[in-house]
Image (spheres, grey):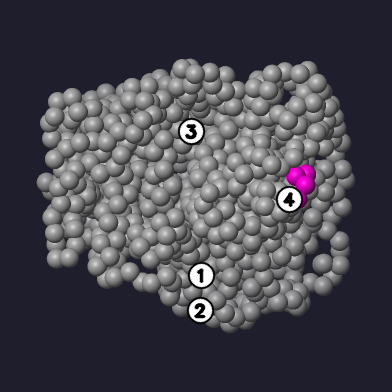
Amino acid sequence: MNRRVVIALLAGGALLALVPWLHLPAFYESILYLVLHWVLLATSWNILSGYSGYFSFGHGAFFGAGVYTTAVLAGKFDWPFLATLPAAAAVATGLGVALGAVVFRVRAVRGELFALLTLAVTFVLATIVLNTPIDGGPGIYLSAVPVPALAPTQPGTFYLLALAGAVGSLLIAYTVQRSRLGVGLFAIHDDEDAAEVMGVPTYRYKLAALAISCALAGVAGGVHALFISYVTTGEVFSITVPLTVILMSVLGGTRHWAGPAVGATLITALLYAFTKGDLALAGKATTGAVLIAAILFMPQGIVPRLLKRRAAAPAAAKPPPVAIAPMSAPALALKGDTLLRATALTKSFFGVQALAGVDIEVRRGEILGLIGPNGSGKSTFINVVSGHYPATSGGIAFEGREIARLAAHRIAHAGIARTYQVPRPFAHLSVRDNVAAAAMFGGASLSASRARAEADHWLAFTGLADKADVLPDALNLHQRKFLELARALASRPRLVLLDEVLCGLNPAEIDDAVALIRRIRDAGTTVVFVEHVMRAVTALSDRLVVLNHGQLLAEGAAADVMQRRDVVAAYLGTAHAAEGH
Amino acid sequence: MTLPSATLLAQSALSGLFVGALYGLIGLGLGLSWGLLRTINLAHFAFTFAAAYLCYQLVSSTGIDPLLTLVVIAPLFFALGCALHWLVQRFEVTPLNSLLVTFGVTAIIEAGIQAIWSADFRRLESHYAQAKFKLGALFVPVPELITLGVALALSFAIWALLKHTDLGKALRAAALDAPIAAAFGVNQRVLALLLAGTCAALAAVAGVCLSLSFTLAPSQIYAWVGVVFAAVMMGGLGSALGPLVAGIVIGVSEALTMAVTAPSWAPIVSFTLLIALLLVRPEKA
Amino acid sequence: MLLRVTDLDVAYGPAPALWGVSLAVRAGELLSVVGPNGAGKSTLINTLAGLLRARAGTIEFDGHDITRLPAHRFCAAGIALVPEGRRLFATMSVRENLELGSLLPSARTRRATSLEHALALFPALKPKLQSPAASLSGGQQQMVAIARALMCRPKLLLLDEPSLGLSPLVVQDLFAAIRRIGADGMTMLLVEQNVATALQIAQRVYVLEQGRIVAEGDPQSMLARSEIRRAYLGSEA
């Protein structure tokens, strides 16, 4: 956490708080209010949608909930205005959390579907508000509500309230970005399923971000209700709010806490610079043109572009290497007992049984090879054990504990990690941060600073140390597979599931990888690996399990299993059997 | 709350059918653009209204049949659509950022419309406006019927094109994997420009149909955004028939709700249905 | 010489990936390119298929200079690609994928016969014609990818790591099919990680290392060179 940023924000806020005493014309104070109002709204939207990638088209609903809470409480029930603000925040948050609690459970509702759903919620809420005594149709007048005298003028008071909100939201956005929650949200943004399997409690984190976002939007709404002093559903729940906050955030940069603020300031200033008379239309057109130009030439947003310029500065000094303690010996001492037992494990997809009741036992300290034809259920087995998919039926006991239908992040915390056949790195995080995230959220659950040191250790182990600061798309396939491996190991699992880690490597590279996997086992981690490269399978496996059509075909010592006629016929083919590979 | 007569309900459903067909017609180009070109084209609505205004102007000035204005308007917007997509291609704009760029274009077009025709309401006067005939107990207004016919014809034509012709398959393949499609002879860049132009021309057609039945005002542009996006997302991105079906479902449920309760309750049925659909069977969406 | 590549320089992103690569393919032969990961094999094949542009050097195919040809014209020139990882059009049916291989007018008119020929080569695909490509197993998808390229009626077939991720039994069948295609007279350039099989099947081999051709010859003489054996066959050698 960079103290300087926090101090700068607070100092800046304090300085700006003096503006009402400059006695500017009301027009300018109102414009300044609007700028800060949009900074608050856009920043609050970005905390969920920008960081996690769940683009909400429904910010208008939460904003509107805040508006109407204040309007009803102050306008109809004569509450003091300032007292309505916490209520506005609470109602908006309650609405958001209720919505999120349901929607975030439905796995397929992401991307456009989430956008659509939140848009629909806005319309539904608007209709309900319009047709019930909350509004009823004529709108609510707040002109009789006394404005607290925080500043010499009324617009000045609104300005101060919006300033407090804006500075508060920036502080919160900054804090979230640097926190564990922020890292988790950014991981969710890049690959939610991989993040969940790695140990990020995705449901909880999304709800938290949504709650914060709604609370801030509610406050913005409450203040705005009194500012406009006449509230109608048409104005409040229009598509302008959601669309505008998206535009402002994307323009400024969604991956940075200050991005939405920059976008908001720019767009609001542009729009209102032209408010005088005939220029309004020209202003609108100019804003459009500026927006187009900015996106075409700065697609990541303004703030990242500005930061890139400054990044020519020398890299921060690396922290001194922290000695990493090897896995404790007791793990090896217990070698041989059952670590994982799958019983009658079944997984069906749309009526097709990918796993049809398999019984597999994994012993502590062994390297278990899992082979079989494509479509035999090997990857499905890994997916079910790691929690990527829930099992349809059957049980999985890990160290005696039933894990079959647990949330994937809990399985990760129990000590299981996996790699993906097609590597799924977090595209916007550096190689080191990818591995550090696993150290933070996986079974090891390290703090941010210790996680980075741990990441460096595992990058060195897999030979990726010199690539630590690049983005994953700069790596070739082999390196990306090893990044998967480093990420899996960084969570210090007791069981690691490797899904075709060797595919795409040439024989010399395969030898290196085999040696690496042996070292992993010797350090105390049990290994289950799926492979087609028979050289590696025979070299590594203590035991082999052969799957075919979702069922267990054979199981036992490698040499024995490979000789069996049914295994040869189903999978190996005569070439391997004859040459005894 | 007494239930209205069967005739009234049927008439409501019919008018819902018609407005739903317009939702679908506007959504047709939007969905194709989103699904096949990865562009979320907010300017589609601005194009629709610009075409509507142009049609209004041409009819007011020359008195020709509104539908004939398409001879001029459709190619014009085809060219506009191509030009806009050329820009998107040239700068490799991501789908999300396309939302912003097109929003910018919308702002410019909206300002232009207001500059030329002012913010006042405009209504196209033509011999279609009052034409209607009776089908049993129901009144069928001709402009709306034309809109329905156009929507059905275009949706089916495009569906057939996408499903059964080589051109359609090439378009779908290019949307799935442009470099590999190119390796098999698909000139993705040219096809994309043609498709973008077609989508804009479809917007223009929708605009002309819109001008036959609705009063025009610049502020109206955004009124359609929500419900048409809903129709597109419900019907499926890149689908030719989906937006039409979804649009009609939304239109009819809105109209029936309006008939049974108050007009202001209209959005609730369709959008609640949508929410329920998304939560229960999201894969269908 | 059906294909002649001279002094090819290709950059992949900012980094150069191929330096001064020269190779030649005779009509009717099966040429294999082997080398370690990151050597540039995929870059080479993607450049020959038109997906990447060369910075310098020339590619001459069937007497024409195709170095500056736009990507979508390579198929018409007579070069068809079986991409790494199959890259089928996942949501489209197998039949549609195959039809997309024959979009060009010349291939279109002979679509029906090309389809018959492809199904004769890969009979397992016949019951799967209407299924979406993504629902097929890895081996079947590879068959579709090869068949799709054949529908183009090419003069040169480029195969990029066809055995990647496939089980040994399936790989056997696959290479048997590739041999049959070669026996019918097709010229092929094969990039393969599975060095042992590549050496068995090819008539000539190029070794690519860090963007440069470092060795060339027939498989036997390749195997005889101990440093090649050690590098690419590892402890198996």
Instruction: Return the mark for residue A377.
Output: 1
Q: Secondary structure at mark 3?
A: helix
Quarter where residue A153 is shown:
top right
Residue at x 75%, y 66% (from the top left corner): A414
**Residue A83 versus residue A277 in the image, above or below:** below
Residue pointed to by mark 2: A356
Which range is magenta?
A78-82
Across and down, in percent, residue A35 comes to: 65, 29
Question: Marks 2 and 4, Cα distance to the nearest angstrom?
Answer: 66 Å
Across and down, in percent, residue A145 comes to: 71, 42
Image quadrant where one finds the N terminus of chain A: top right
Quarter where residue B252 is shown:
bottom left
Residue type, mark 4 in image: Asp
Q: Look at discs 2 and 3 and give the one toward the viewer.
A: 3
Residue at x 51%, y 52% (from the top left corner): A137
Instruction: Return the mark for residue A78.
Output: 4
Question: Marks 2 and 3, Cα distance to the nearest angstrom?
Answer: 49 Å
Question: Marks 3 and 4, Cα distance to the nearest angstrom?
Answer: 42 Å
Q: Main secondary structure of the magenta part?
A: loop
Q: Are marks 2 and 1 in contact (CB under 8 Å)?
A: yes
Across and down, in percent, residue A168 comes to: 77, 38
Residue furthest toward the front? A144
Residue at x 46%, y 75% (from the top left corner): A353
Question: Marks 2 and 1, Cα distance to the nearest angstrom?
Answer: 9 Å
Residue pointed to by mark 3: B100
Front residue of B241/B212: it is B212
Residue type, mark 2 in image: Ala
Residue type, mark 3 in image: Leu
Residue type, mark 1 in image: Gly
